Image (spheres, rainbow, N blue to C red):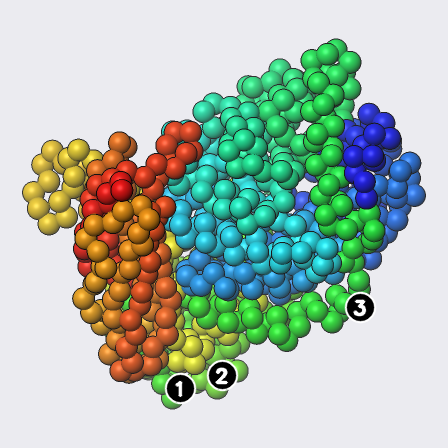
Amino acid sequence: MDTKHLLEIMTFDEKVGQLLQIAPFFFIKHADVEIAGEVKDLGLSRKNIFHAGSVLGIGSAEEMMQVQELYMKNHRLGIPLIFMADIIHGYETIFPVPIALASSFNPELVKQASRTSAVEASTAGIHVTFAPMADLVRDPRWGRVVESFGEDPYVNEVMVQASVEGFQAGDLKDERTLASCVKHFAGYGASEAGRDYNTVDLSRIQLHNGYLNGYKKAIEAGAKMVMTSFNVVEGIPATVNRYLLREVLRDLYQFKGVTISDYDSLHQILNHGCAEDDKEAAERGIMGGLDIEMASTCYIKHLKELVDEGVVDMKLIDEACLRVLDLKNDLGLFDNPYRGANPTEANRLVMSKEHLEQSLKAAYESLILLENKDILPLNKQVKVALIGPHATYDMTNGPWSWRGNQAHNTSLYDELKAFGVDVIHVNDQVDVSSYNEHDFKIIREADVVILALGEHVRESGEAHSKASLRLPRHQDDLFHMIKQHAKKIVTIVTAGRPLILNDVKESDALIYSWFLGTKHALAIVHTLFGLNHPSGKCPMSFPMHEGQVPLYYNHLNTGRPYQPQGHNEFTSYYLDMPNEPLYTFGEGLTYTKFMYGDLHVSKTEMIPQDTLDITIDITNVGEYTGHETVMLFIRDRVAAISRPVMELKKWQKIQLNPNESKTVQFRLTAIDLGYYDQEGKTVIEPGWFDIMVGPHAKDTQKQSFKFIKG
Ligand code: BGC
């Protein structure tokens, strides 16, 4: 399709229509779809509706085809609609939530999860997914950490890239792909006090060296769209923020794709106090660099007047409209407006055996073993007492799985029984007074108590921030009571964010499971009994207290650094609490043990053309086969700006059999030593750098080298 020619023959209304996204129930009343936020009467005329360029959410192939057919019959030029939806960690087959996938430190799993999600969702005629979320997070109170890849900018970059590659698979003409819309641009994860939608105030140095990296990587990986965020940045709502949308996105990152607001976020700039009315919002949006408006109607109602009054240049509308038409063209919609929608293929592909197996494998690798006092894996002959709010719970898909099919979800109890374990389900209650003498007898007689604790599925996700990070509803009290009676206690915590685990740390074994999707319970049971060996590691720091957050390993030094073991008067510390988290970034055990040899660095001086090789031998000295994720951090000792005390630059996940050794090799080049200045330009300064290699941020060996500018 010659989209430039098409643009020439479009009327003004048809052009502005392309910049409007509405829900499918404007076309069919019974649409089977869940929409984020409030559904309001947008006051759209029939004409507006049949000009709208895209649809948010659709329930099935049949619905999509019905809407598209109706729409095209009513559109003068027959320009097809584009269907967008939130396909975050699965369509019907649900994979672990993104924070769980990040724990696997295996980008191939992220890619696979996105690939399979695209295959399934595309059969319903969905063309664009609002994923991945590339927001860096450092505050577990924010409910959306569950949708993130955690606190580290590099992990975020790697996982975001894998996700975009999985969704788009390099060829959008292939109808089993989805175009990726990275979100929420920008800085949404830094909302003050961890409260969703709240103010964000980041310096440009912070933005470029942490918060923007994930979106940048998504764009480099070819993401076709960028969604703006709800928050302000430098006092200006991101949805109309010229610096972000024009200077960073278009000029610096050379992004050629489509921008879209978040749900109603253009209209919401009135609440931010940044527009008098919808007309001013429309003006600020189009001038700022926003193409599509999701779920509000400032453009459709006011752009005409703004152009007639000479306030807005028609060129801006043409450019935005052309970008939308080009996206439709890239997706092949002009050749096949029903792209992807296919009920027969949906039956064949959705929830296929292969997809369910992939979901199980991803769940295996996402589990984090935090404690193990030689109790796991369990022997199948043990007598188990199962207790706690997650014992019979099967809502394990986690937030943003609106289409998730529950038919295959099971509970721990179901899976323990099916596995042939001698298990008694004692009680789901948290309230300690609901346990009686009979319950205590069972607990005392059991070889092991499995205590299944955690958050309900609706305790994390969008608009689900929390001030308290303790295990909800006094679950710690339940733990203490059970511990008094149990011979051994294995605690499993299912949650959407890092919670405070100070008490349950005293369990004989502690597993952090997140929401693992369709195969959640099976993955846990297989892990408990050694059919899977856990290998996940913490992608975020687990605080000891809410007062410590934001808490992250890659912080800057202060002028008065804290001494973990020393005297701290007049240093940066708390009177009542250590500075460190309970579990730091990268912590996580396996069933085996690894021994690290000495760290070798190929040079002590490096010039820009050089590469630096870093090697370390790892040996499995335990009894089980296991995976180890080896992490390499650097520290730029002196620079024009203060640099983090350590920052992850590379990692490798290797598998070793008992007694097996491997040499892990990393290579650094000059670019790995750089940082971004306030304009987002790379700076590499000469001087001393430390290299730290080890299993996690608190356990590394160090070597140093000097970088010399040739
Ligand atoms: C969320 C986005 C989502 C959009 C559309 C919003 O409320 O913030 O992440 O993509 O709704 O469902």
Camera-near label (3 vs 1) is 3
Quarter of image, ligand 1 = top right
Amino acid residing under circle 3? Thr
Give the residue type at disc 1: Lys
- The label on residue 419 is 2
Cα distance between the residues tagged 2 and 1: 9 Å
Crowd rating for badge 2 (residues with CA inside 10 Å; few <14, some 14–19, many 20+): some
Q: Residues within 10 Å of mark 1 (few under 14, many from 20)?
A: some
Q: Residue at x 40, y 80 (%)?
A: 529
The residue at which mark 1 appears reads as 380
Q: Are marks 2 and 1 in contact (CB under 8 Å)?
A: yes
Q: Percent from the top left, x then y, of residue 478? A: 35, 62
- In this figure, which residue is indicated by the disc labeled 3? 344
Q: Is 84 or 174 nearer to us in this picture?
A: 174
Q: Residues within 10 Å of mark 3 (few under 14, many from 20)?
A: few
Q: Is residue 479 left or right of residue 257?
A: left
Between 478 and 622, which is closer to the camera in this rendering?
622
Query: Relative to residue 492, is residue 332 drawn left or right?
Result: right
**Residue for point 67% across, 22% down:** 282
Residue 403 against residue 354 in the figure, above or below: above
Sooner in the amino-acid sequence: mark 2 or mark 1: 1
The relative height of residue 180 versus residue 314 in the rendered view (above or below) is: below
Q: Nearer the viewer, residue 193 or 252?
A: 252
Of mark 3 and mark 1, the one earlier in the sequence is: 3
Residue 23 image position (x, y, % from top left): 74, 42
Residue 205 found in image quarter:
top left
Q: Amino acid at mark 2?
A: Phe
> Of circles 2 and 3, which is in front?
3
- Determine whether 145 is above or below 100 in the image: above
Q: Which numbered disc, 2 or 3, marks the residue that appears first in the sequence?
A: 3
Residue sitting farthest toward the left: 567
